[in-house]
């Protein structure tokens, strides 16, 4: 499932591809993917422009000139592609937003959705989300305090969108590896130094992964060399049985808080 780096990569790329371009039409082939009737969806978008692209947690936000916002959550298996009909991947498209000969295709939206949200509703929709990892008001000390009050494991905390938003199964493991901490550790057992390390690793891993295009393997547009660049750089996630890049021990898979998790039991403590 795409996490902060994947959605942030999409946000940055789409900002230069679609912002201020006139929407000439839409097509919805799976009505369940949206929250209004397809006719109304078309009326709300046709003739409009996206004024800016935003992101909150794992949601991508298309802020329309009309004041409405399109809220996209890709969930498991959702991807996007921008290009002509000829360039489109051979996949079933659930929603299409057209810009003349170019289109933004939403693919694999089985659990994912694209909802039109009126001004004022957006805040309510996002109210239960925890702070963004790069929220300027979140520092090492605040993070350490929040963490100390949590039950469960580091894994369950990091993926809890109410604790911190935008992190999922892949990056929670990568962050724990970077910090040299076992994902199964109880948050309150962490020393102050370990909490600071975890905070620094969270920002470092998410920032590098975003710069490298995240791990989604499908290019966003023809010739896109950035998207998916981080896929080969994951150091523990889905690397069961391979040698640890830090100490050479074997990466193991162990379920933590009922979630699939990967780590090195030699150099993560
Ligand atoms: Zn190791």
Image: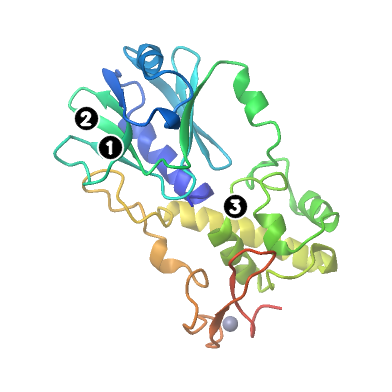
**Pointer 2 or 1: first along the chain:** 1
* Residue 35 at x, y percent in the picture: 49, 24
Residue at figure coordinates x 56%, y 80% from the top left: 252
Mark 1 Cα shell of 10 Å, populated few (<14), some (14-19), many (≥20): many
In this rendering, would 94 be left or right of 243?
left
- Which quadrant of the frame does ligand 1 lie within? bottom right
Residue topped by disc 2:
102
Viewer-nearest residue: 103 or 43: 43
Mark 3 Cα shell of 10 Å, populated few (<14), some (14-19), many (≥20): many
Identify the mark at residue 82; answer none if there is no mark: 1
Which type of secondary structure does the marked residue at label 3 adopt? loop
Residue at figure coordinates x 61%, y 61% from the top left: 172
Vertical arrangement, residue 50 with respect to residue 92, above or below: above
Which type of secondary structure does the marked residue at label 2 adopt? strand
Which type of secondary structure does the marked residue at label 1 adopt? strand
* Residue 131 at x, y percent in the picture: 69, 41
Query: Quadrant location of residue 135?
Result: top right
In this rendering, would 31 be left or right of 92?
right
Residue at figure coordinates x 36%, y 11% from the top left: 43
Spatial distance from mark 2 to mark 1, Cα to Cα?
7 Å
Please say if the residues under marks 2 and 1 sit with CB atoms less than 8 Å apart.
yes
Viewer-nearest residue: 254 or 4: 254
* Residue 161 at x, y percent in the picture: 66, 46
**Pointer 2 or 3: first along the chain:** 2
Residue topped by disc 3:
167
Vertical arrangement, residue 224 with respect to residue 39, above or below: below
**Pointer 1 or 3: first along the chain:** 1
Residue at figure coordinates x 47%, y 67% from the top left: 234
Q: Mark 1: is the Cβ under 8 angstroms from ligand 1?
A: no
Vertical arrangement, residue 95 with respect to residue 146, above or below: above
């Amino acid at each position: 499932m795409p996490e902060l780096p994947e959605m942030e990569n999409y946000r940055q790329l789409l900002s230069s591809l679609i912002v201020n371009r006139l929407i000439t039409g839409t097509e919805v082939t799976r009505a369940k993917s949206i929250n209004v009737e397809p006719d109304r969806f078309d009326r709300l978008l046709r003739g409009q422009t996206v004024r800016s692209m935003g992101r909150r947690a794992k949601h991508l936000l298309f802020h329309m000139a009309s004041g409405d916002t399109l809220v996209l959550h890709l969930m498991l298996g959702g991807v996007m592609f921008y290009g002509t009909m000829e360039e489109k991947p051979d996949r079933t498209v659930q929603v299409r937003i057209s810009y003349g000969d170019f289109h933004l295709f939403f693919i694999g939206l089985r659990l994912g959705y694209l909802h039109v949200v009126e001004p004022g509703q957006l805040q309510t929709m996002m109210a239960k989300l925890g702070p963004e990892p790069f929220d300027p008001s979140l520092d090492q000390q605040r993070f350490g305090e929040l963490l100390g009050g949590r039950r469960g494991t580091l894994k369950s905390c990091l993926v809890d969108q109410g604790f911190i938003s935008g992190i999922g199964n892949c990056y929670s493991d990568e962050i724990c590896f970077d910090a040299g901490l076992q994902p199964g550790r109880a948050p309150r057992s962490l020393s102050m130094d370990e909490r600071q390390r975890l905070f620094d690793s969270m920002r470092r891993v998410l920032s590098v992964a975003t710069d490298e295009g995240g791990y989604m393997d499908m290019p966003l547009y023809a010739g896109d060399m950035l998207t998916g660049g981080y896929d080969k750089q994951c150091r523990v996630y889905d690397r069961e049985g391979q040698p640890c890049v830090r100490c050479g021990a074997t990466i193991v898979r162990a379920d933590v808080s009922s979630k699939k998790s990967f780590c090195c039991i030699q150099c993560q403590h």
